[in-house]
Amino acid sequence: SLHGFVGVDLMMGDDPDCDTVIEINPRVTMSYVGLSLMCQTNLARALIHPGAPLAWSPGTVQFDASGHVR
């Protein structure tokens, strides 16, 4: 089982059967950038206090090949 900060790099395919986990990291990763943009509440607080409430904006976040968020 995993405990603490974990970053999962996931590549989503056109079909859910094509989704692939690329890497699991024992730290916050670039996904935090995208998640923090979508989170309406304090994401950092929720990482430190697991019971803290989270609220999410609808939509998606995508990174381009150079790491920019769109």
Image (cartoon, helix red, strand yellow):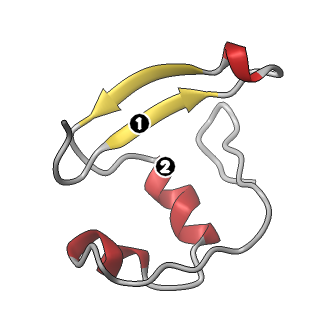
Q: Which residue carries the number 1 mark?
A: 8
Tell whether 9 sits left or right of 28: right
Q: Is residue 11 above or below residue 40?
A: above
Residue 51 is situated, as x and y percent measured from the top left of the image, at: 30, 79
- Mark 1 touching mark 2, by CB under 8 A? yes
Judging from the image, what secondary structure is the residue with disc 1 in? strand
> Looking at the figure, which quarter contains the C terminus?
bottom right
In the rendering, at what x and y percent does residue 9 appear?
47, 32
Three-letter amino acid code at the position of disc 1: Val
Q: Residues within 10 Å of mark 2 (few under 14, many from 20)?
A: some
Instruction: State the residue lying farthest toward the top.
Output: 18
16 up-or-down from 26: above or below? above
Give the quarter of the image for residue 42.
bottom left
| Residue ID at (54%, 30%) | 10
Using the image, tell me which numbered label, if any, was put on residue 28: none
- Rendered view: 19 above or below 7: above
Give the residue at x 45% y 57%: 32
Q: Nearer the viewer, residue 45 or 37?
A: 45
Q: Residue at x 59, y 41 (%)?
A: 67
The amino acid type, in three-letter code, at marker 2 is Ser
Element carrying mark 2: helix
